Amino acid sequence: MIFSKGGDSILYVGRVHGPQFIERFPSHFALGTGSWQNQFLKHHWRETKTPNLAAAAMDASDCELLLLLSEPLDAARLEALWIRFLQPAYNRAKPKAGLPTSFPEGATIESLLENRKTQEAEQVGAGDAEEAV
């Protein structure tokens, strides 16, 4: 899911997955400070300096939310790609192995994911070869 404000300002990229997606989705907007799934709301609270999470939720009510569907195994990779390329204000950009630093001309999300899977498989194979020696 991608949160934006005004269409041009990307605030947060996160992922929601699993068979209970619909049941778990509201917890991303929980007003309790002890909730671990409301990361967007906590970031928004800190950035806007609103008095509490309820006020942050009201302030964020005009944000746009884009839900993107993917295969469960690709969710983490897609999240990393979106964070890398969109550079949302509330996510800390963490370098991920196997991801390009810029979007190559003519590349597709599918080709970037496939390239990452290949690199991960090669790393596992290299580790197996080192153990055999």
Image: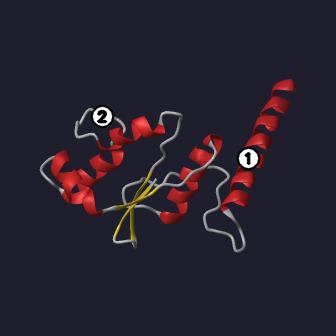
User: Which element type, helix, strand or loop, lies under badge 1?
Assistant: helix
Residue 101 placed where, x, y %? Answer: 61, 63
Instruction: Tell me the colour scheme of the image.
Output: secondary structure
Image quarter for residue 39?
top left
Would residue 95 be visible to someone looking at this image?
A: no
Residues 8 and 24: in front is 24
Q: How many numbered circles does the render carry?
A: 2
Residue 20 placed where, x, y %? Answer: 48, 33
Residue 46 placed where, x, y %? Answer: 23, 52
In 3D space, how far apart are the residues under numbered discs 1 and 2 (Cα atoms)? Answer: 32 Å
Indicate the quadrant containing the C terminus: top left, top right, bottom left or bottom right: top right
Q: Is residue 98 above or below residue 31?
A: below
Residue under label 2: 35
User: Which element type, helix, strand or loop, lies under badge 2?
Assistant: loop
Residue visible at 69% across and 65% down in the picture: 108
Q: Nearer the viewer, mark 1 or mark 2?
A: 2
Left or right of 91: which side holds 112?
right
Residues 68 and 95: in front is 68
Residue under label 1: 117
Residues 121 and 32: in front is 32
